[in-house]
Each structure stands twice: as C-alpha cells, then as structure tokens.
Image (cartoon, rainbow, N blue to C red):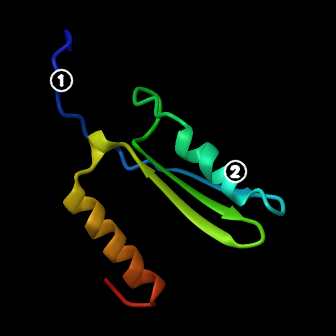
Amino acid sequence: ENGTPRPQSWDGELDYQELEVGSGEMEETLLAERMSRFELGAQPPLRVRLLRGDSLALHFQLHHIACDWWSMLLLVEELEALLKGQEL
C-alpha cells in the first residue's frame, strides 16, 4: 500500500507442472526454468517442476521473499525423508 511493504499470506496454491523433455534436453530445460522470473502479483512464490526424460528431475524454485534459509533446510530435510519412505 502506498509503496510501504506489508506482509501477505499465501493461499497455498502451487504452480506445479510435469514436463516431458526429449533426449538430451534435461539440462537445457532446467536452465530455462532457473532463469524464469517470478511475477509475484500474479504467481505463487513457489514453482515445482517434475521433468521426465532420460531421467527424472524435481525442480523447486522458491522466491527469496517467501522463505528463509532455515525454512529451506527444513524443506530439503523433509523431502529427503519422504523420498526414503519415512513419515514426517
């Protein structure tokens, strides 16, 4: 409001997409995802992409305004536990 920053809550909507990539296109697609900018007025501050090709890649892109380092570490630890089949 009037140029003054104010906290806003996020409704939890997720920008998630599954993308099929051709042989040898994984790195190029990941680079394009990393280079894409956030439009915070129109998009959630978190993007998740599951890329399927010769291999699988799960790409998280989180805007720095929405997460601090401690929260990011917690996210990574919980993802690791889930991938190992552990309950949270």
For the point 83% across and 59% down, the residue is 22
Residue type indicated by callout 1: Pro
With 36 as the anchor, is 52 left or right in this view?
right
Q: Name the residue under label 1.
A: 5
Q: Which of marks 2 and 1 is in front?
A: 2
Residue at the extreme right of the image, as rendered: 23
For the point 17% across and 27% down, the residue is 6
For the point 76% across and 67% down, the residue is 53
With 37 as the anchor, is 27 left or right in this view?
right
Residue at the extreme top of the image, as rendered: 2
Q: How far apart are marks 2 and 1 (CA)?
A: 36 Å
Count neighbours of disc 2 (C-alpha within 10 A) and say few if under 14, some if 14 to 19, many if 20 or more.
few
For the point 26% across and 40% down, the residue is 9
Question: Could you tell me residue 34's position as x and y percent?
Answer: 53, 46
With 75 as the anchor, is 36 left or right in this view?
right
Q: Regarding mark 2 in the picture, which secondary structure is present there? A: helix
The quarter in which the C terminus is drawn is bottom left
Count of numbered circles in the view: 2
Count neighbours of disc 1 (C-alpha within 10 A) and say few if under 14, some if 14 to 19, many if 20 or more.
few
Residue type indicated by callout 2: Glu
Q: Do the residues labelled 2 and 1 touch (CB within 8 Å)?
A: no
Residue 39, above or below 85? above
Q: Regarding mark 1 in the picture, which secondary structure is present there? A: loop
Q: Mark 2 or 1 closer to N-term?
A: 1
Question: Could you tell me residue 42's position as x and y percent?
Answer: 46, 29
Question: Could you tell me residue 29's position as x and y percent?
Answer: 68, 51
80 or 87, nearer to the observer:
80
Residue 82, above or below 16? below
The disc placed on residue 28 is: 2
